[in-house]
Amino acid sequence: MDSVLPGGCQCGEVRYEVRGKPLRTYACHCSICQKQSGSAFGLSAQFPGGSLDVTRGRLEHFVREGNGRGFRCYFCPICGTRIYHQMFTEKGDLPRINLKSGTLDDRSWYKPGCHVWAENAQPWVKFSDEDVVFAQQPKPEEMPVFHE
């Protein structure tokens, strides 16, 4: 896995580079991620804040509440592809971003380190004995750290 990972939106208007390795990777089965992805779950890779640079185009954002937190959700204003979201509190942004892994050019290395909000998983989703599964949202320190 390279230390600089390029990616972008569906229409190609937005391009970005994210530096470094992810802190964590996960599949989220909450109803919000299901709606956002149009699928049974969303895939994300968590990186330190400030590690993503938009190299072409611009991102728009909206704010939403969910799972007891506030989120800023960044997307391409042309095609609507979500690029990342960032949680925030009344005290400000938390120092990490949650990149939508499907927007990376090379996704071959990606594997979710855990599954969160599994209590909302679709009934046909089956977890293996090796999967790390949380019924709801674990504390960050409870989630497995990323290993290549």
Image (cartoon, grey):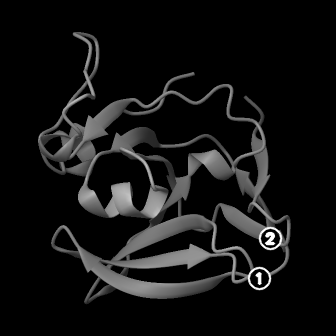
Label 1: few (<14), some (14–19) or many (≥20) C-alpha neighbours in 10 Å? some
Instruction: Mark 1 and mark 2 in contact? Answer it, CB < 8 Å.
Output: yes
Q: In the image, is residue 116 above or below residue 128?
A: below
**Picture coordinates of residue 110, whole percent (x, y):** 58, 30
Mark 1–mark 2 distance (CA, rounded to whole Å):
6 Å
Label 2: few (<14), some (14–19) or many (≥20) C-alpha neighbours in 10 Å? many
- Residue drawn at 57 percent across, 76 percent down: 74
Q: In the image, is residue 133 above or below residue 140?
A: above
- Element at label 2: loop
- Image label count: 2
Quadrant in the picture for residue 113: top left
Q: Quadrant of the C terminus?
A: top right
| Residue tagged 1 | 58
| Residue tagged 2 | 14
Q: Is residue 54 left or right of residue 80?
A: right
- The extreme top residue here reads 129
Q: Amino acid at mark 1?
A: Arg
- Residue drawn at 81 percent across, 66 percent down: 11
